Amino acid sequence: MSTVTEAEPSFDRQATGSRLDWQRMLPWGLLALLMAAMLGLQSQLYIGQERTVTAIFMFVALAQAWNVIGGFTGYACFGQVVFFGIGGYATAVTMVHWHLSFWLALPLSGVGAALFGAVIGLPLLRLKGHYFAIATLGVAEGMREVVTNVPALTGGGAGITVPTVGEDATTAYLGNDGFYLLFLGIAALSLVVALVISRNRFGFALRAIHQDEDAAGAMGINTTRAKVLAFSISGMLTGLVGACYAFQQVVIFPDRLFDVELTVLMVVMVVIGGSGTVLGPLLGAVGLQYLSEYLRHSYTEAHTFILGAIIIVAVVFLPQGFVNYVREARRSGDYSLLANVRRYRL
Amino acid sequence: MSTPPVLETRGLTRRFGGLEAVADVSFSVPQGEILGVIGPNGAGKSTFINLVTGHVKPSSGTVLVHGKDMTGAKPWTLAQARVARTFQIVKPFRGMTVRENVAVGVLYGPNHAVTMARALVRADEVLDDVGLEGARDRGPAELSTADARRLELAKALALDPELLLLDEVMAGLRDNEIQPGLDLIRRLRDRGLTILVVEHVMKAIREVSDRVLVIHQGRVLTSGEPDEVLSDPRVIEAYLGKRYAERHEGESGA
């Protein structure tokens, strides 16, 4: 059929040099090193510090999860907390009513959140920009009402208690060290997923969709499938975090598990760190969560005011996020923040 | 049985509300032909390409590629069926290098089973082909207008197309930049590609097309040999208005 002979791919040239291999392996090496350091850290910390670090791990996972759909794919999801709530309630409900072990409830919650992502993603991912953001926000708010209004299953507004002690306990409570390791594991998983996506062909598809969906389609990318898959992966990671959170909190309420503030935190962490990168959301989550804890201790009265001011300044001067700013500044040799503001002026 | 044309449309129509942007367009492009498509602004040329590549759904009519019904197929289905296109307003993937931009097409096109390393090698070959080898590690934002058009073309060629739809790839180029573009189009045809060129630059159309199709107000006005079509009074009238056409006629008749 095809008479195109010259254009047939010839794959004899070597594309990878040693420099490229080294560059490819570096983030993995750093990640392994970081994990090894974190694995020993919990025995060195006071209980309060250990809880703070555990919370940081949780936000690292949440930020990285949001980054998959909001950063790489460019679909800013303002209802991401719906996956967190679904994951948490799936774990609580299956542990209470089905007497499942937490270790079975956890993957089930992840699968449940992923499926939910696929089901709402198919219609919602046809929307773009603000329309998508508002629609997902609506889904999260709606889901909170649904969960509140089926008390027989979810305990309703009065909350549901995960069985963690006595005869009913299907899995013994993990304790501070246990949850430290659990959230460390989830954070590591989210980082691995983000690293894989940032480098493989699927990541190319997501970045292409982010830039221009028509052009991505013209390049052979099944944009519907790629977007729904990205949303599912993002939802699964968020659902897993929600499941761990429910187990850690023991008693969960719809207002907390579907709290829009959680979504806002994910978005802010990713945007300030640098969306669409792996390092950005990691730095954003660690930096913001640490700063928030520090301010809470040092300035009990005004800590949210100061944190808010810092976020505003960061967004004004680094609209593209810290990591992207450093990347461009190094390439262009121009570190001026004012020049940066000018470059990204609206 | 003779081989079916690479592209054939039958009664292709697209309405936007009360406006018929493309109305009852029927024609075919045989293997290896360069078909020039011209028409004044708003004639429906870009909509026509969008209808063929699945970016806009037809209201009625049929699109056949190699005789196979592809009406309303998704853009990625057509890309994998070796139908490639460029966009009138270039659509590079910012945040990727020029080389990666092209590699996306290799990774997701008809030969999509390739590895990332091989896709990058193939991308380099395509960049050599269009004369962008020096810019492979640059970002699309750093390219000149002419190079941005080359990248747009390279992305389409990454799909190893059999049918190439070029939507005003010469627009905004200087005269000395147009000639290499025309040479490249002819070189691609010599390899067996079938090419549909939508263009405003008449010099380019006259020089490169085997046949010219004129679209006016969504309908086929005429088609035929470039010289014959471009001197057709109806075509001149469509472009420049009735009065100019009459004067032109009077002068050439005198």
Image (cartoon, coloured by chain):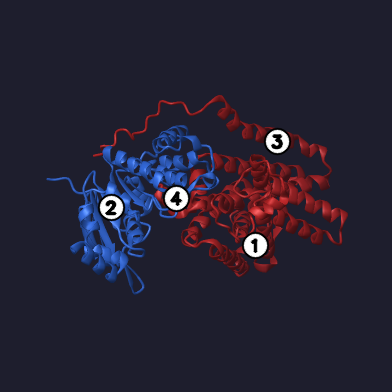
Chain colours: A red, B blue
Q: Nearer the viewer, mark 3 or mark 1?
A: 3
Which residue is disc 4 drawn over?
A216
| Residue at 63% in and 35% down | A27
Mark 4 → mark 1, Cα distance in angstroms: 34 Å
Which residue is disc 1 drawn over?
A258
Decide if residue B144 is on the left or right side of residue A158.
Answer: left
Mark 2 → mark 4, Cα distance in angstroms: 26 Å
Decide if residue B81 is on the left or right side of residue A279.
Answer: left
Closer to the chain start, of discs 4 and 1, is: 4
| Residue at 63% in and 59% down | A81
Closer to the chain start, of discs 3 and 1, is: 3
Tag 3: residue type?
Leu
Q: Which label number is shown at residue B36? A: 2
Q: Percent x, y for residue A11?
A: 40, 29
Residue B11 visible in rendering: no
Q: Nearer the viewer, residue A185 or B168?
A: B168
Q: Nearer the viewer, mark 4 or mark 1?
A: 4
The quadrant the N terminus of chain B occupies is: top left
**In this rendering, do the residues under marks 2 and 4 share a single chain?**
no
Q: Percent x, y for residue A18?
A: 56, 25
Tag 2: residue type?
Gly
CB under 8 Å between callouts 3 and 2? no
Which residue is disc 3 drawn over?
A34
**A46 relative to B215, above or below:** above
Task: Assess disc 4: are there few (<14), some (14-19) or many (≥20) residues with their C-alpha within 10 Å of its C-alpha.
Answer: many
Q: Nearer the viewer, mark 2 or mark 4?
A: 2
Tag 4: residue type?
Ala
Mark 3 → mark 1, Cα distance in angstroms: 31 Å
| Residue at 72% in and 50% down | A337
